[in-house]
Amino acid sequence: MDAVVKSLMDARPAGLPAANDAQVSRPSREEAEEAVRTLLAYIGEDTGREGLQDTPRRVIRAYDELYGGYGHDAEEILGRTFGEIGTFDDFVLLHNIPFFSHCEHHMVPFVGKAHVAYFPVERVVGLSKIARVVDAYARRLQTQEHLTSQIVRALDDVLKPRGVAVMIEAEHMCMSMRGISKPGVTTITSQFTGAFRNDPAEQVRFITMVRGRS
């Protein structure tokens, strides 16, 4: 049995965390590719035809990339900060951070932009790190509400700022391509902590800056 468990762990796709192996026995790459063949057959395809012969391998390689967020830790991403900010005491806003994610209900994409702001306390984090946090959570099976709260919680817990504001705008393909089939509909979620939550004027200023640049 130990040998089987070790084999499954060794087969883990690059970029996926070892921590999850204790909770879920992940199938081997070969088993995952066979599952893709099963789905292709289910939709009525001939899995032996030339155009589909390498599709299972390509799909699993794509999954390693599309769901690579499971292998990244927000605390590690935000771990390095910088103290040379002079007398700066306002919030930092990153506007229009593009992302793509996948709905956990139908496993189809939702695509949009995140707007993230925080009030630093003495130290700031590199701007690219905030975008990396957005990607780390977006490249997982998600709901937009959960994605919003995860970004907020990561910044709040690691940076200990005076406040965090996050707004996400996205189009969900599970609504555009199937079901009600309404393309072009945008879903907006937002969450505030600290100074942004307690002071409506700061919320308004954040939203005004976001909307003024859209």
Image (cartoon, grey):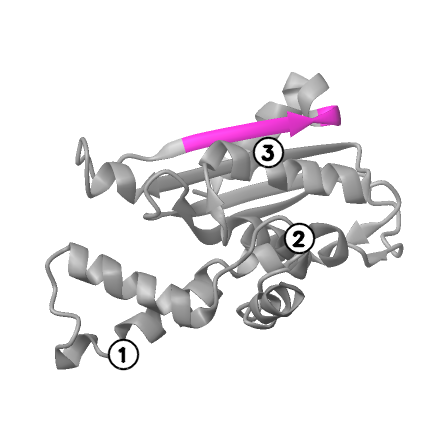
Q: Tell me if residue 177 can be seen.
A: yes
Q: Using a 10 Å C-alpha cutoff, classify the residue at mark 1 as few (fewer than 14 neighbours), some (14 to 19) or many (20 or more).
A: few
Find disc 3 in the rendering and name its residue. 149
Amino acid type for the residue under numbered disc 2: Ala
Q: Which residues are magenta?
A: 188-195
Q: Element type at marker 1?
A: loop
Q: Which quarter shows the C terminus?
A: top left
Image mark for residue 20: none
Q: Nearer the viewer, mark 1 or mark 3?
A: 1
Q: Element type at marker 3?
A: helix
Q: Element type at marker 2?
A: helix
Kindly identify the residue that appears in the image at 56 percent across and 66 percent down: 8
Kindly identify the residue that appears in the image at 37 percent across and 32 percent down: 187
Seen from the viewer's position, the closer of residues 186 and 51 is 51
Q: Nearer the viewer, mark 3 or mark 2?
A: 2
Q: Which quarter shows the N terminus?
A: bottom right
Q: Nearer the viewer, mark 1 or mark 2?
A: 2
Q: Using a 10 Å C-alpha cutoff, classify the residue at mark 3 as few (fewer than 14 neighbours), some (14 to 19) or many (20 or more).
A: some
Of mark 3 and mark 2, the one earlier in the sequence is 2
Image position of 28 with respect to 184: above or below: below
Q: CA distance from mark 1 to mark 2?
A: 31 Å
Of mark 1 and mark 3, the one earlier in the sequence is 1
Find disc 2 in the rendering and name its residue. 22
**How far across and how far down the image is residue 78, in percent?**
75, 54
Circles 1, 3 touching at the beta carbon (< 8 Å): no
Amino acid type for the residue under numbered disc 1: Asp
Image mark for residue 54: 1
Amino acid type for the residue under numbered disc 3: Ser
Image position of 100 with respect to 117: above or below: below
Q: Is residue 15 left or right of residue 30?
A: right
